[in-house]
Image: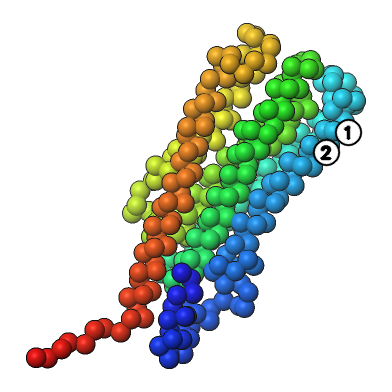
Amino acid sequence: MARTAEVQSTEAGRTPSKEQAEFRKGRGPIDWLGGWRTGIVAPLIILALAFAWRLYQQFTAWTKGIDASSHDFTIYYRIPLVVELLGVTAFTLGWWAWLIRTGRTIAQKISHNEEVRRIAVFWGLIGATSVCLFVEASFFPNQDASWHQTAVRDTAFTPSHIPMFYLFFPLGITMTIGTYLYGRTRLPKVYGVEKGFPWSFALLIAASVTEMMQVAMNEWGHSLWIPEEIFAVPFHWPFVFYGWLAGGIFALWAETLIRLLAIEDEVAAEVEPPAKEVVA
C-alpha cells in the first residue's frame, strides 16, 4: 500500500513526486530498516533483558538468593533491584517527555507514505508491548510459582520477584502508555484529540495498571493468608481480569488497519484520471 502511488504513477508515465522521494533507499515506510525497524529492535531488547535475567538467576538464585537477609543477597539481588527501578524510571520519564515534547511540533498534515511509516512504527510498539506483557504475565509468573513451591518465601524480594515485579511490570505500564502517546501525537486521523480517548487503549492501559496493583494484593495474601503458591487461591482471581482487559490490544491493529485501507483508497483516487464525459 505504501508503494501504490509510486507504482501507479510510473505505470501512468508520470515522474515520481516529492512524496515518493522523501525517504532514503532502504528506509521507506515498509522497509526493514524503515518503518519496521521499531518492530524488530524493541522486542529484541525486551527479550534480551528477560534472557539476561534468566541466565543470571541460573547461576545465582540457589547460591545467593535463598536468604533475603544475607549480605550475598544484598550484593547480587538488591543492587540489581535498585538499578532496574532507576533505569525503568529514567527510561519512562525520558521517553514519555520526548513523545509529548516532539508531538507538539511534529507535522500533523503528512503524506500518505509518512502516515504508513508511522503506522508501521506503531505496530512495532504494539509488538514490543505484547512481548513485554507476555514476559511479565506468563514467563516469570510461572517461574515464580515453581520457585515458591520449592524455596522459602521469606519476603516480597525474591530472585523470581525482582525481575518480574520491579522491572517488567512497571515496564508494561511504560509501554502501554508510551504507545498511546505515540498514536496520539503521530496518528491524528486515528487517535487525534477530536477522536476522544479510545476504548482500546483504555482497556490495555487498565490491564497493565491492574497487573501492577494486583502485585500488592498478591503479596499481602501470601504473607498473611495462604503462604502456599496455589494457582486457584482467591487473591489470584483478579489476574483473570488482566487477561480480559489486555484483549484491547487487538483493537489497536484493527483501528490502524482500517486507516491503511482508507489510505489505499485515497491514493488510488489521486492517481486515477477522472472519467471523461461521453457526449451523445
Return the mark for residue 31. none
* Color style of the picture: rainbow
Give me the residue at 69% from left, 37% from top: 167
Instruction: Name the residue at the front extreme.
Output: 280
Q: Which amino acid does label 1 sit on?
A: Phe
Q: Seen in the image, is 36 located left or right of residue 111? A: right
What residue would you read off at disc 1?
59
Categorize mark 2 by other alpha carbons within 10 Å: few (<14), some (14-19), many (20+): few
Dot 2 falls on a residue whose secondary structure is: helix
Q: Nearer the viewer, residue 142 or 236?
A: 142
Q: What residue type is labelled 2?
A: Leu
Cα distance, mark 2 to mark 1? Answer: 7 Å
Q: Is residue 223 visible?
A: no
Q: Which of 113 and 196 is in front in this view?
A: 113
| 93, above or below 189, in the image | above
Instruction: Name the residue at the left extreme.
Output: 280
Categorize mark 1 by other alpha carbons within 10 Å: few (<14), some (14-19), many (20+): few
Q: Seen in the image, is 52 located left or right of residue 125? A: right
**Callout 2 touching callout 1 (CB < 8 Å):** yes
What residue would you read off at disc 2?
55
Give me the residue at 52% from left, 56% from top: 122
| 262, above or below 90, in the image | below
